[in-house]
Amino acid sequence: MRLIQEIAVCYGYDISTDEEHLYMLNILRVSSTGDVKAKAEFMVILKQIEQILLTITWREMADSLAKKQLNSLATIALFRKFCNSLGIQLTKRKALQIVPAFGAFVGAAFNSAFINDVGKAAYMSYRRRKIEEFEKKLI
């Protein structure tokens, strides 16, 4: 989460809002799954959240309507699907650590690959979101 927060701050987003926390959790969820079908499904949800964030002004976000839209979209489903997919992926990736000789190597490789996946997903998501915001301002 710290890596995602750092990337969000670099792109100028306020990480203290509930809407941004939801967006960051979706980025983590997208980056943690290895299944292409599930990743595509999570990307659709992430895109829907982006569209809501783009269409609603920051003043309106404080309004209850914006929070209801975002919460009804993904809050309950987010945690259920996120926990399920993250648990399965972590179990699959960490299974080789049972063997002590390979444990350190597999752990280091897993941590490196996981952070790399999360960083790429956060970078591309925030980059795409910033570009769309600039394009909207030009129109």
Image (cartoon, rainbow, N blue to C red):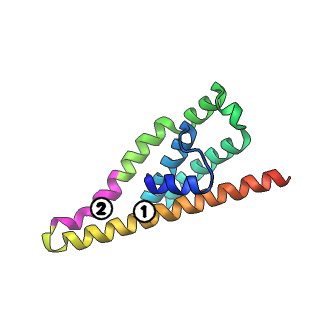
Residue type indicated by callout 2: Lys
Residue 42 located within the stretch drawn in magenta? no
Q: Which residue is mark 1?
A: 34
Label disc, if present, on residue 92 of the rendered structure: 2
Residue 9 in picture, x, y percent from top left: 56, 52
Boundaries of the magenta span: 87-98
How dense is the environment of label 2, judged by Cα within 10 Å: few (below 14), some, or many (20 and up)? few
Q: Give the CA distance from mark 2 to mark 1.
A: 10 Å
Please say if the residues under marks 2 and 1 sit with CB atoms less than 8 Å apart. Answer: yes
Label disc, if present, on residue 58 of the rendered structure: none
Residue 124 in picture, x, y percent from top left: 59, 62
Q: Residue at x 62, y 33 (%)?
A: 69
Residue 91 located within the stretch drawn in magenta? yes
Q: Residue at x 68, y 46 (%)?
A: 51
Q: Residue at x 64, y 29 (%)?
A: 62
Decide: is 13 above or below 69: below
> Residue 57 appears in which quarter of the rendering?
top right
Please tell me which residue lies in front, 116 or 40. Answer: 116
